[in-house]
Amino acid sequence: MNPTIVDELIKKLSLLDSNKEYVELAVDLNDIYESSNKLDRLITDTLNSPLDQENLIEQLIEIEVELDHINWHYKSLKKELKQLLNT
């Protein structure tokens, strides 16, 4: 996690309501951002590396794990946004 990005996201998100704390929302956004970068690297590596079947399967499993991570943070982010927009 990049603390600088999280801090900047918290500052930006605090514009919506000064009485709210946006740490979880900022962390989710940051983790989605970092995971999307990792996913980009994984796909690029898959395309550029000579892989046998076993290594390809391992690479696809890593991609799946990263997608699951993004999905978890997306669900959390969606829940937080609903709460934010309903207040």
Image (cartoon, rainbow, N blue to C red):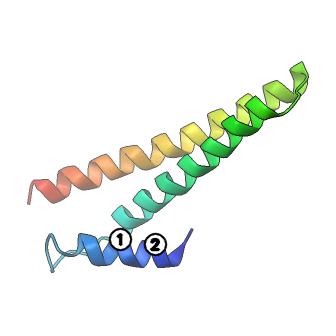
Q: Secondary structure at mark 1?
A: helix
Q: Is residue 50 above or below residue 33?
A: above
Q: Which residue is mark 2?
A: 5
Left or right placement of residue 7 versus residue 40 in this view: left
Q: Residues within 10 Å of mark 2 (few under 14, many from 20)?
A: some
Judge from the rendering whether residue 11 lies leftward or rightward of residue 64; answer left or right.
Answer: left
Q: Is residue 9 above or below residue 18?
A: above
Q: Position of residue 14 (x, y in %)?
A: 22, 75
Label 2 is placed on what type of residue? Ile
Residue 9: mark: 1
Q: Nearer the viewer, residue 83 or 17?
A: 17
Q: Contact, CB < 8 Å: mark 1 with mark 2?
A: yes
* 62 or 40: nearer the viewer: 40
Helix, strand or loop under label 2: helix
Q: Position of residue 23 (x, y in %)?
A: 36, 71
From mark 1 to mark 2, how far is it between C-alphas?
6 Å
- At label 1, the amino acid type is Leu
Please identify the residue farthest to the front as the structure is shown. 48
Quarter of the picture containing the N terminus is bottom right
Q: Dot 1, how many residues are within 10 Å of its Cα: few (below 14), some (14-19), or many (20+)?
A: some
Please report the residue visible at 67 percent of the width from the left and 35 percent of the height from the top.
43
Task: Return the residue found at the far top.
Answer: 53
Residue 86 lies left or right of residue 4; in this view the side is: left
Q: Which residue is depicted at the point 9% across and 54% down?
A: 86
